[in-house]
Amino acid sequence: MTYILGLSASLRNARFGLGEEKLINDLKKIKTKNSLLKFVNKQTQILLKQFFEKGKKDNIPFNELYYTLRKRRGDRGLSNSEAAISFALWSAIKKGSDVKYISLSNIFKPNDRVEKIDYLKNLVLGCSGILLSGPVYFGDRSSIAQKFFEFLKNDSDCLEYIKNKPFAGISVGAKRNGGQETTLIYQIIDSTNLGMSAIGNDFETTAQYGGTAVAGDIGTMPEDNYGFKTSISTGSRISDVVNIFEKGKSKIEKKRNSKTYKLGIWLLQDDKNKKGESYINSILNKLNLNDFDVEIINVVNEKIRPCIACDICPTHIGPPPEYRCIIKQDDDFFKRYHEKLINTDMYLIAAYSPSSKEKVISYYQQFIERTRYLRRDDYLMGNQLVAPLVISEIGSNQNLHIRMLTSLIRHQTILHKPLIAYEHKNKILNEVNLLKDFQAYLNVSKIVKNGVEAKEFIPNRYHHYGYKVSEHKYQQDLKEGKFQISDSFRKKLHESKN
Ligand SMILES: Cc1cc2nc3c(=O)[nH]c(=O)nc-3n(C[C@H](O)[C@H](O)[C@H](O)COP(=O)(O)O)c2cc1C
């Protein structure tokens, strides 16, 4: 049986060797969230106690104490990153996934020593997904996490194997806004660039970048309830997505009749001569698109009004095909294209980004903000494989692909490697690699589509955390049974596709 591979990239990891296996065995025995919290709390306190008690008793200076504690047995205690991953792995176990755990600080040692790399490699080569937890160091990932990504990139077997495997992250920082999200975003960029499919946390904690915990000193992570919840939710999401991938792969293997997939390409920024659109058409002409029905919607021809932040969207609970944003003008892009946007099997958010912005027409930001009513409608744009498609002139430096990734993940999507065409003197410089990446996107997106269809219908309920007005409206709709009607419609729709 394959497993989700949990990794911790902390310099203070407490588990190694048999202690890693023991952690998983202990987690498997825990039945409830309360017992989980108690267990993890106790384990993190062990490190804290060791630190103070041993230091006091033996009157050891802090620097010596650090080296003494590093020589522990490895079967007790948890660093903050290990605490967070324990929550996530427990949650994945509860969802039916098998899991394994390895502490990266026992592979990538101080002074650039590397030990047991084959052990790590074998674990990677058997996994169904990777869940990486680590501390925030200067708003970024730890050097151990960095070394892990470099290892994946340089090992050709691993690099090939991890393509089309889901990746999720958790980060722990000493402060609120200490860089937990930037750390997760860098990992999303790293993992998608390696060809993995990156995801965040689940809809129960409103689909953000992954687990985010606040803890400074050793032993403090379990006190952070939000960190606990988002770690649990990240474990649940990776378990679901691994399931989607496995179901999708087996459905494609078994299926004989061919199917046509609807690929939407939404071009949100172009120049007046539609140079972006013509680049995209010439790229499409060079791909094998036999199974695809592709539609490019060039938004620069349209009128997209900005969101008015009404905070009550969607205006009412209803079936997905009904347009329910408060902006109702007949010529508004979303009113005209609502059904097309929600009826894709996979989509790319595209833009042309020349270095001179003089002739550029951009609806990018307006488009993204207007999709709020779709996110709040139980993630109508979610659970599809999505990627940025950017034609970027050398020197443009707009970093649109990063902004696209960070906005798209909020729709509870599955992110794929950004497709970036580098333009110079009216030519695409990296066409061969771009076509390879594009074809890989098409292949993985089919897996996701089939997997989502084969999965049981569960409403991905949007939670209105942080909003009093819309939460009030939500509670009222719930009481009046409106979600039951809408859920049963969505369930039928889902089942008709399977
Ligand atoms: C070199 C270094 C840099 C750090 N930078 C940050 C930071 O930018 N933001 C933050 O919130 N915490 C920062 N921290 C604090 C750690 O993220 C925090 O202590 C975390 O709990 C460590 O997790 P661990 O117990 O798994 O090692 C830093 C710690 C170290 C050692």
Image (cartoon, grey):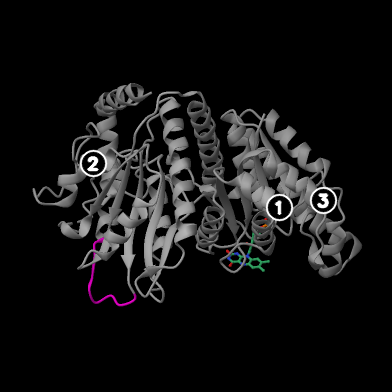
- The residue wearing badge 3 is 116
User: Mark 1 vs ligand 1: CB under 8 Å?
Assistant: yes
| Marks 2 & 1, CB-CB < 8 Å contact | no
Q: Is mark 3 on a helix, strand or loop?
A: loop
Question: With respect to residue 182, does 89 lie above or below?
Answer: above
Measured as percent of width and height from the top left, residue 59 is found at 89, 66
- Amino acid found under the numbered disc labelled 2: Lys
Q: Is mark 1 on a helix, strand or loop?
A: loop
Indicate left or right for 199 with 46 as reference: left
| Marks 1 & 3, CB-CB < 8 Å contact | no
The image quarter containing residue 277 is bottom left
Indicate left or right for 38 with 317 as reference: right
Q: Specify which label sits upstream in the sequence, 2 or 1.
A: 1
- The residue wearing badge 2 is 340
Measured as percent of width and height from the top left, residue 332 is found at 13, 52
Q: Can residue 364 be seen in this view?
A: no
Q: Give the range drawn in magenta.
A: 355-364
Q: Specify which label sits upstream in the sequence, 1 or 3.
A: 1
Question: With respect to residue 298, does 93 lie above or below?
Answer: above
Indicate left or right for 55 with 439 as reference: right
Q: What element carries label 2?
A: helix
| Marks 2 & 3, CB-CB < 8 Å contact | no
Front residue of 57/25: it is: 25
- Amino acid found under the numbered disc labelled 1: Ser
The numbered disc on residue 79 is 1
The image quarter containing residue 399 is bottom left
Front residue of 308/331: it is: 331
